[in-house]
Amino acid sequence: MNHADYLAHDATALAARVAAGDVAPATLLDLALAQHERVHGRVNAVVRLMEAQARAQAAGPLRGPLAGVPFLLKDGVQDYAGVPTTYASRTMTRNVPARHAHVVRRYLDAGLVVFGKTNLPEFGIRAVTDPVLFGRTNNPWDLARTPGGSSGGAAAAVAAGIVPMAAGNDGGGSLRIPAACCGLFALRPSRGRVSPGPGTAEVWFGASTEGVISRSVRDSALALDILQGAEPGDPFVIAPPAAPYVELMRRDPGKLRIGWSTASPIGTDVHPEAIQAVRHTVRLLERLGHDVEEAAPAIDGTALAQSYLHLYFGQIPAAVRGAQALGGRTADLELMNRILVTLGDSVSAMRLTTELHRWNDFARVLGEYFGRYDLFLTPTLAHPPIKHGTGDPSSAEQRLLGFLNGTGLLGILARLRLLDKTVEKIAADNLRYVPFTQLSNLTGTPSMSVPLHWTAEGLPLGVQFVGPFGSEERLLQVARQLEEVQPWFGRVPEMARCGEHAVT
């Protein structure tokens, strides 16, 4: 098998070749490692190789529906026993878990051959992947642009042809945003569909969940079959699917009523290409026989953005406390995370609790919307993949923030509620290019990004579907329909195709 053959197969097809005895797991691992070596200097997607573990695993015996397929974890949440989980932070380099996360054990039990970990922004809080610890990850479609975040390394690895599918997680769009930036498919499951343990009960108060970024809908369906289901001690258990998702995906969803909107929920600009992506998708859906109507849930997007930002105010200081217990220093944090620690320390428990309670209000309004519509369609991104550094604070702003934080003035102003407008600006600036994805996280609903549009410059730009709680099968069915009428699997960046090296 050479790299062209490898690239022509999704994970499901590679597993079938392994099962038939046509190719050995070690050969697939060699191909994945060779492609990583070829593109690493340009993309920087994989930040920790685990070749020794992978070689031992590939030597077998391997069992499971994806036995022998090379695979990558994300260097956050997805603990692999004995291997550091750094969250791309210098404060967490000593964080070496003693046991696998449940999702990692399930990936391994499925036969996936894990050979490395992918890049992310520090603590996974940005929609770009540019940590100081590991350096930025570049988009294989245009190296001057971001692959998105926080699962940017995972998306870049798949788009660059290193693996057909990679693990990620999604606390505010972290699967869907990089998938949209890199021309890939990603499904974010409902809250509770996948166990987050054992290291935590609910990641980011339940806003985050685990999933994969892939090149085919069936790979994501199979991955969800592998991941779904509760583990002992999980905070709650949701109803399992009526059948495997790989089977449910193939069923006809019937005629659906789908609402859509291209308006930014926080009132910021939406690029004409993002609007065009949705309108093109509307036409495809109508061709498939669905009723499609412009209509959005009556949710205050600015209030939702502020509630989302308060998630950071609760989580980042707590994460840093954990890092300090391992010997990490607050001074080793990147500037914006040091700012978030200060702001978070200044937010009262009452204010944080109030903001968390608002998540229920958003969920109720969205639930009423889904009484009238089966799905909600939006752009995934408000703008095509941005160039590196776009939207970052200027050097002068960074110096001012650093001064205020270092002198303690920032904390004093925050405790006096004199920074409320500044917090609103941080929320707007942070979400300007990605204002659509957080709705699903705070309401716990499933959502997906589907790669249906490429810009005039040849950049991918996905569209997002949000469904009612527990409706993953309906999302997969619609994605499969769209994949059939407008296939995207063969559309890959030139970087992925080059160097069709053979491995015997």
Image (tube, rainbow, N blue to C red):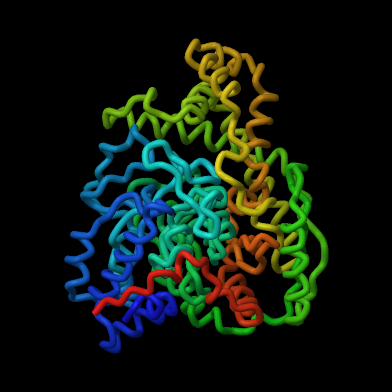
Furthest-right residue in this view: 294
Query: Nearest the camera: 326 or 386?
Result: 386
Counting from the top left corner in percent of width and height, residue 370 is at 72, 63
Q: Residue at x 48, y 59 (%)?
A: 155
Counting from the top left corner in percent of width and height, residue 475 is at 61, 70
Above or below for 286 versus 397? below
Name the image quarter holding residue 291.
Answer: bottom right
Asked whether the viewer can see residue 197, the reply is no
Furthest-front residue in this view: 499
Above or below for 282 versus 331? below
Asked whether the viewer can see residue 393, the reply is yes
Q: Quadrant of the N terminus?
A: bottom left
Q: Residue at x 40, y 51 (%)?
A: 44
Name the image quarter holding residue 374.
Answer: bottom right
Counting from the top left corner in percent of width and height, residue 156 is at 46, 58
Counting from the top left corner in percent of width and height, residue 20 is at 29, 89
Above or below for 101 versus 20? above
Q: Residue at x 24, y 49 (%)?
A: 83
Query: Nearest the camera: 43 or 465?
Result: 43
Q: Quadrant of the C terminus?
A: bottom left
Q: Residue at x 48, y 64 (%)?
A: 159
Is 485 placed left or right of 123 in the picture?
right
